[in-house]
Image (spheres, rainbow, N blue to C red):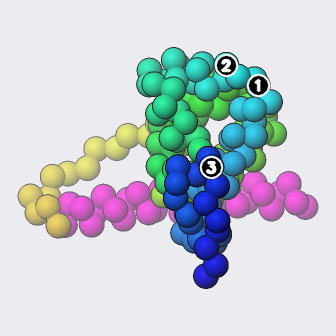
Amino acid sequence: MTKARKSPGSAGRSFELFDEQMPVRRYKLLLQTFLKRRGPGARQAIAEGLGHTRSFVTQITSPAYDMAIPAAQARAIVRIAELTPEEERVFLEAYLAAHPERAPDLYAQTHGGLAIAVPDLQDPAAQARMEALIRKLAEDVIESFLGARQREKGA
């Protein structure tokens, strides 16, 4: 694979143009574009809204850093940055393409969470398998409904 040249804003790192971090870079580039439209105070507003420093916001919004945006903060960023519905849709689709396993956490923030009680199996390995299966089932159900919605819109 061809390496990209180091750019002044890339924290002195080079990276492959197409690698496993590309989906993360994509949603970060989108977010950067949306934040630039909001002016110079957008990052500071996000930092204050999240209770973090501006440098933390730079790390989670810059494609030069591999640090992913935590699912719990993705929705908060959308709200604080006052993204338009279209910008929100594009950003969240790119975010979920990069982190499909975070869909339940992301949607729980907007549509209410779902909590279920599970028995303690007294076997950590079995407990982990059971919880993973429940999560996978929930993710598949969510994806099924989202896919149906997309098909309806396309029809």
Q: Report, in whole angstroms, how far the alpha carbon at label 2 lies from the one at label 3.
A: 23 Å
Location of mark 2 (residue): 41
Where in the figure is residue 37, as x and y percent of width and height? 80, 30
Query: What residue appears at the point 46 percent right and 62 percent down from the top-left corner?
Result: 137
Residue type at tag 2: Gly
- In the displayed structure, 60 sits above or below 36; it is below
Dot 1 lies on which element? helix
Q: Do the residues labelled 2 and 1 touch (CB within 8 Å)?
A: yes
Location of mark 1 (residue): 38
Query: Can residue 12 be seen from the camera position used here?
Result: yes
Where in the figure is residue 115, as x and y percent of width and height? 38, 40
Magenta stretch: includes residue 111: no
Q: Report, in whole angstroms, how far the alpha carbon at label 2 lies from the one at label 1.
A: 8 Å
Q: Residues within 10 Å of mark 1 (few under 14, many from 20)?
A: few
Quick one: label 2 or label 3, which is nearer the N terminus?
Answer: 3
Dot 3 lies on which element? loop
Out of 43 and 123, give the one closest to the viewer: 43
Q: Are marks 1 and 3 in contact (CB under 8 Å)?
A: no
Which of the two marks, 2 or 3, is nearer to us in this view?
A: 3
Magenta stretch: includes residue 129: yes
Location of mark 3 (residue): 8
Q: Is residue 9 left or right of residue 69?
A: right
- In the displayed structure, 86 sits above or below 144; it is above
Residue lying furthest right in this view? 155
Query: What residue appears at the point 71 percent right and 32 percent down from the top-left corner?
Result: 35
Q: Report, in whole angstroms, how far the alpha carbon at label 1 lies from the one at label 3.
A: 24 Å
Q: How crowded is mark 3: few (under 14 residues within 10 Å), some or many (20 or more)?
A: few
Rendering quarter of residue 132: bottom left
